[in-house]
Every structure is written in C-alpha cells, then in structure tokens.
Image (spheres, helix red, strand yellow):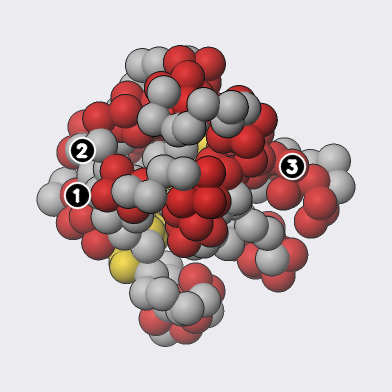
Amino acid sequence: MINNSKEAIIFDLGGVLLNLDYDLTEKAFISLGMTNFGESYSQLQQTDLFDRYERGEISSFHFINQLLDRLPLGTTANQVVHAWDSMILDFPVKRLQELEALSKKYRLFLLSNTNDLHIDAVRRSLEKAVGHRSLEDYFERTYFSSAIGMRKPETKIFEFVCSENNLDPMKTVFIDDSPQHVAGAKSIGLDAFLLEKNQEVFDLPFFLA
C-alpha cells in the first residue's frame, strides 16, 4: 500500500535491508583471543575506537592496528578483517525488489553508521545477490557515517540529510533497528519506525496500512 501523506523514506542498512549478526563478529574476536570484545562493541553501544572509525576520523589501517594491539602476538591483519566482517551477511533479493517498486512512489535514501571495511563487505554481498549493481542504484542518495563525519543518533546527521535534500521531516519516514537511532530521528520530527528483531522491514505497519 502507498501512504500518500509521505514523500520520502530514509532506510538504515544493516539489520534492515542487509542481514547482520553482531554475535558472529563477537565470537570471531573471542576466538582470536579478545574475550571482552562485546564490552567494546555491540549494536547498542561502542567505545571511542569504533566511534572514530565510523566517523572516518581514523583509517582502516589504524583501526586494524589498534585491534591487533589488543590481540595475542601472531594475529594477522587478515584475521582481524575477517572477524570484523563476520557480521555482514546477505541481501535478500526480495527486499531489493521491494525497494525498486517503492522508488516509483517515494524518494528513497540510505543512512548508515558504517566504515570502509564494512562498506567493501556490503558491496561484495550485494554483488552476490544481484550481480554488478551498486547500492546507489536503489537510492536517490546514500549516506555513510564514515564519509560525512557524523553518526546516528546525533541530531545533526538527520538535519544534514533533510537539509541537503529539501526533505520535510513531517513528510519523511525513517526506519532503523536501533532504538537510540529512532529516538534521534524523532527528535527532529521524522516519522520514525523501529524494526524489531526478526521483523521483516516491509511488514512494518507503514507499508501495510
């Protein structure tokens, strides 16, 4: 169904359109010897190293080396990258097809807290699903935190996306699987929906009303 009172939809990426499993990355780092990884990084919170990497303030090289410093001697950079990317799973083709259909009725945007290593992994996952197509084919604009120096749930990132694209928050939907991000979006007037665990994005009431 189409909601005629809305003009645009801003989607989160991981956990909404792309399948993710944070536990796989935690388990991978534990297997490498970092038993307290979950205290440093999770869906709900993370330490400064991960924040800085997601804002693009440090390079992948620096990020990997910082993690290597916390791991046993002999751990390789490739092992760190493999562990870090373990959470990136698949793109269900049906979701991508739904996006294409929605793009005929709404302006579509992507807003993701992510980093250079994960962006590469996401693009590989997309290629496995649909061949040589890019994320940019599905959206009017894509925004990655590491490219714009801001992260959800900071108010300024939502204001930035709306301002740059002349979006009226009252006529714009935001969908994310993290409650703190939904709260940030609501604070500027976006009609924000929280996607619960194991809930399919296109089964949200907005799409069924």
Query: For residue 100, which numbered disc appears in the image?
Result: none
Image location of residue 127, percent across then percent down: 79, 46
At x 79%, y 56%, the residue is 129
Label 3 to label 1: alpha-carbon separation: 30 Å
At x 46%, y 51%, the residue is 30
- Which amino acid, by three-letter code, is at mark 1? Gly
Residue extending furthest toward the right:
131
Horizontal relation, residue 160 to residue 27: left or right: left
**Do the residues under discs 2 and 1 have CB atoms within 8 angstroms?**
yes
- Which amino acid, by three-letter code, is at mark 3? Arg
Label 3 to label 2: alpha-carbon separation: 29 Å
Horizontal relation, residue 27 to residue 155: left or right: right
| Residue on which disc 3 sits | 124
* Residue 24 is at least partly visible in this image: yes
Horizontal relation, residue 98 to residue 5: left or right: right
Query: For residue 154, which numbered disc appears in the image?
Result: 2
